[in-house]
Structure formats: C-alpha cells, structure tokens
Amino acid sequence: MSASLRVSVLIALAVVSCSGAGGEASSSASDVILPPTFGNVYTSVIARRCTPCHTVPGEIGITDGKLDMTSQAAAYADLVGTEAAGVSCGGKGLRVAPGSPTDSIMYLKTDLTDPAPCGSKMPLGGPPLSAADVALIQAWISAGAQND
C-alpha cells in the first residue's frame, strides 16, 4: 500500500471515528469504511446521490455539464482524466485528476469544508455527502482513481 493511500485511509478512519456525538463513533450505515475502489464509490455514493441529476444526455434531468453517471462504465469514462464541461466549470480542470483530490473538481465540489471551485456544491439541492462518503472519494482519487 502506497504512503498516500495509507494516509488517506487513516484520514477516513479518523473522520469516521470522530463523527459521533461526544467523541463516540457513529453507527450509521454511511459511516462504514469501504476499500477505496471505484466500485465502492459508484455503488455507495454515485448511484445513490448523483444519478438523479446526472443522467443520459438528451433525457430529462441531464445537467449542463454533460456528465452521465447512469452506469459505472459511463461514470468512470466521464470522470477520470476528463475535463469539466458546462457553463460554470468548463475549462476549470479535470473532473478527477488521478492521485490528486485537491486538483479534482469532483472531490472539491463534494468536500464538506471548502467552497466549490466552480458551480455549486454537490449534490445540488440535497443534503451534503457524509464525511465517510467524502473520505471514500478522497481515498479513491489519492490511490490513483483506478477502475476496478
């Protein structure tokens, strides 16, 4: 395991273990620590929280960013190493820059602490992702954003 992946996993563990009231670990299902694979990112975050808006181009609900997340294969192709599109984020960088969460618009738009680098924080119109979900995205990107 690379040093950066170890650090990301340790950060995810710290975030989850400190997220409960009074310093106790939270027991919600979203706080389960998953290995940082794209399959886990897709199943536990994207499929649940992103696909209501990021649908097939031409269909009702497509965003101006032309980001199709209706299947794991489509989401990976439209995210990793792909320039952001749309009115707000077009030309602002990569959606996912493998190995660098801080250069990845996906991470920056879902991170709980920073303002979005362009457009709005995601998911738009819904509650923010859990700390565990954000940590999973960060760890996956830090580990090289591989497709499993």
Image (cartoon, grey):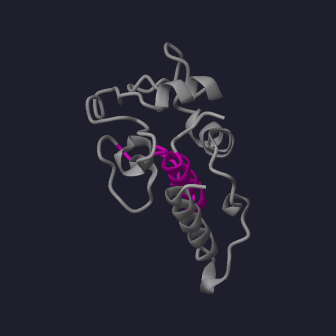
In the displayed orientation, state which residue is furthest to the left: 91
124 drawn magenta: yes
**Residue 68 appears in view:** no
15 drawn magenta: no
Question: Which region shows up in magenta?
Answer: 120-143
Q: Is residue 18 above or below residue 99?
A: below
Q: Identify which residue is drawn at 58% across, 53% down.
A: 136
Q: Identify which residue is drawn at 26% across, 30% down.
A: 91
Q: Identify which residue is drawn at 55% across, 29% down.
A: 76
Q: Is residue 111 left or right of residue 32?
A: left
Q: Is residue 20 left or right of residue 96?
A: right
Residue 102, how many percent across, how many down? 37, 51
Quadrant of the image containing the N terminus: bottom right
**Residue 28 appears in view:** yes
Quadrant of the image containing the C terminus: top right
Residue 27, how many percent across, how many down? 73, 70
Residue 69 falls in image quadrant: top right
Residue 26, how many percent across, how many down? 68, 73
